[in-house]
Image (tube, rainbow, N blue to C red):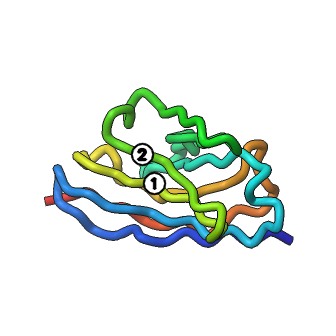
């Protein structure tokens, strides 16, 4: 069973930066594409795809984060990163990582709160 462990979230002021990490316990980490998602705190909100990195290292981003967030990975550490800059209050959410296509069991996520 694959384990996904997200970390690095916290409280940050608007305009600030954070780097999220996702440690993956999969032996085939190098072979997969990886996504970062987020789920805002508002009731009934759905999980939004934020960024994707392919096994080759190609990246893609949602329109709301393009130019501000950067996804990367370290194959030697089985870890996916999300560098977030110029953070806005609307970036407040719980952030999750998962394979594309996703494993059925998600991690606990990491809370990001952007507020002054």
Q: Upstream in the sequence, badge 1 or badge 2?
A: 2
| Extreme-left residue of the structure | 116
Crowding at mark 1 (Cα within 10 Å: few <14, some 14-19, many 20+): many
Q: Find disc 1 in the rendering and name its residue.
A: 82
Q: Nearer the viewer, residue 21 or 76?
A: 76
Q: Secondary structure at mark 2?
A: strand
Residue 87 horizontal/vertical position (percent): 26, 49
Quadrant of the snapshot with the N terminus: bottom right
- Find residue 9 and report its image quarter: bottom left
Q: Nearer the viewer, residue 87 or 29?
A: 29
Which residue: 73% across, 44% down? 100
Q: Nearer the viewer, residue 58 or 10?
A: 58
Q: Are marks 1 and 2 in contact (CB under 8 Å)?
A: yes
- Find residue 56 and report its image quarter: top right
Residue 90 horizontal/vertical position (percent): 31, 44
Which residue: 62% across, 71% down? 77
Q: Which mark is residue 15?
A: none
Residue 105 vs 93, above or below: the answer is: below
Residue 15 horizontal/vertical position (percent): 17, 50
Which residue: 79% across, 50% down? 31
Q: Nearer the viewer, residue 39 or 49?
A: 49
Count of numbered circles on the image:
2
Q: Is 52 left or right of 11, judged from the image as shown?
A: right
């Amino acid at each position: 069973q694959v384990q996904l462990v997200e970390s690095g979230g916290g409280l940050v002021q608007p305009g600030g930066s954070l780097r999220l990490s996702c440690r993956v316990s999969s032996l085939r980490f190098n072979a997969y594409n990886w996504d970062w998602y987020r789920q805002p705190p508002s009731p009934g909100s759905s999980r939004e795809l934020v960024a994707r990195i392919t096994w080759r290292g190609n990246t893609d981003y949602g329109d709301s984060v393009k130019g501000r967030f950067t996804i990367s990975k370290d194959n030697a550490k089985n870890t996916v990163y999300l560098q977030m800059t110029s953070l806005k209050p609307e970036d407040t959410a719980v952030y999750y990582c998962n394979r594309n296509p996703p494993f059925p069991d998600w991690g606990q996520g990491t809370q990001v709160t952007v507020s002054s």
